[in-house]
Image: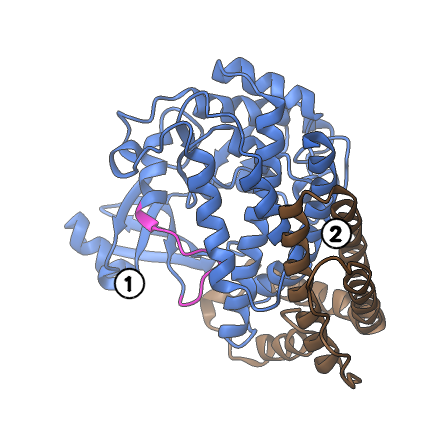
Amino acid sequence: MTPTLPEILRGNFMSLAQPQTPDMAGDFMTSRIGVIALLNLLAAQDAERGTAAIVAENAAIESMLQASTTYAVVCPDPANAITPAAIDARNAALRRALIVLHTAVESLGDNDTDRRILALYALMAAGRRLELPPLP
Amino acid sequence: MQIAAYLTRVWRVPVTIEHLARIPGGASRETYRFDATAGGRIRQLILRRDPVGSLLDTDRQIEFEAYRTACGRLPVPEPIAFERDGAELERPFFLMERIDGGIVASPFTAAPFGSHASKIGEAFFRHLGTLAAMDPAPTPLGDILAAPAPYTCWRVALDHWAGVIDADEAHPQPIVRAAIRRLRAHPPPPAQAVRIVHGDYRSGNIIHDGVGGILAILDWEMAHLGDPIEDLGWAFDPIWNHFDDGVVCGMIPRANAIAAWEAASGLTVDPVALRWWSLFNAVKGQAIWTSAAREYRANGCIDPVLGISGWYTARRHDEIIAAQLIAFAEATA
């Protein structure tokens, strides 16, 4: 997914490190720092469970593709994905295959498989949830 | 100072600028407040200038003409000047009156309107209904925007935002892709009337006075002509509910909002149309966040507002779309 966690953290560093112009002082900078702090809070969550969520999503999509044998959708070969970037790249390949599968399912009017894919979407989205507390 | 040079030229009187400060929020324009003194008179103004990288690729003239259209009919700041080529300020901009003393609610706060939520909510949806009642043809906005046919409003809108996702997507998004296909397969009824659509009508785009009054409706940059139900679908999106599922925009229950809107607009809310425009608006939101992520990365990840838009809100909208897809499928089975 984009932006990635390293991009967020590097971006926060660059946002704070770059020289500020005089017109950015006051409310603007206060708000900017607040958003950077919020990004850090969410980044902590993603660092704790983000990779596990993508691994689980990959397994769920793979399972869906393999169970849909009546459709000629090729499940991407498992790669030796042990880094977050490689796991994300496999996720992209699996998601592309899932889009192809769902489009085919809709074309055939296969409501049972359609419902299972919609349920999978809900699980995928929940797995990537970032918990944002109400701000003061 | 560039602003002083510009105003001195167009007002034909020496102008001095004081208290220039950038205002937070709004990733699609650089927004500044300042005081301009000319001939002994102080004018409190806002400058909206195109940034180098932007959340939205919109025509700044549309926003200016939208303010001209709404001025006198709805609470909006008076538009002052518009320069498409940027003039002394080098990038396109416009100027408008500044409204001080009000509050803008962050979408990340709970119960931002406190005990005045009901009063603000009634006014908020009444104003939106007033906009929906307006014939756009004789207005400044009607002069520059093409009106779609009632039966093509949905397709024009969906084609636009699906195209944004096509252009800006970096990682495959099966959930929003499924929503786009579902929307195309089950179009809504034709618009009852083609009206001015604000395009970003939500709780964070008003200034309120803290005691139940709306001082100004802002951020008209996505204004267009279309089905007025579209604005309701955006305002009702759970992403703007301020952590309270029982109300819309952190204000009033959905049924009350619809009643206020219908009374002011003279139109009715078809539940089938609203269901379509609600899912559409979740798609539109995801398109905006997809663009935000692209801009964030393209500009070195230094704008945290683009970062949070392209990351947190994108994931939140995936959840919203996934839930709405299940409900949409059940309703259309």
Q: Which residue is mark 1?
A: B89
Q: Which residue is mark 2?
A: A135
Question: Which quadrant of the view contains residue B289?
Answer: bottom right
Q: Residue at x 43, y 56 (%)?
A: B29
Say if mark 1 contacts mark 2, CB within 8 Å: no
Magenta span of residues: B52-61
| Percent position of residue A3, x then y | 63, 70
The amino acid type found where label 2 is placed reads Leu
Q: Residue at x 70, y 49 (%)?
A: B108
Report the quarter where the C terminus of chain B lies.
top right
Chain label for disc 2: A
Q: Is residue B242 visible?
A: no
Question: Which quadrant of the view contains residue B248?
Answer: top right
In the image, residue A9 above or below residue B315: below
Q: Main secondary structure of the magenta part?
A: loop
Calculate the distance from the C-alpha at mark 1 to the C-alpha at mark 2.
36 Å
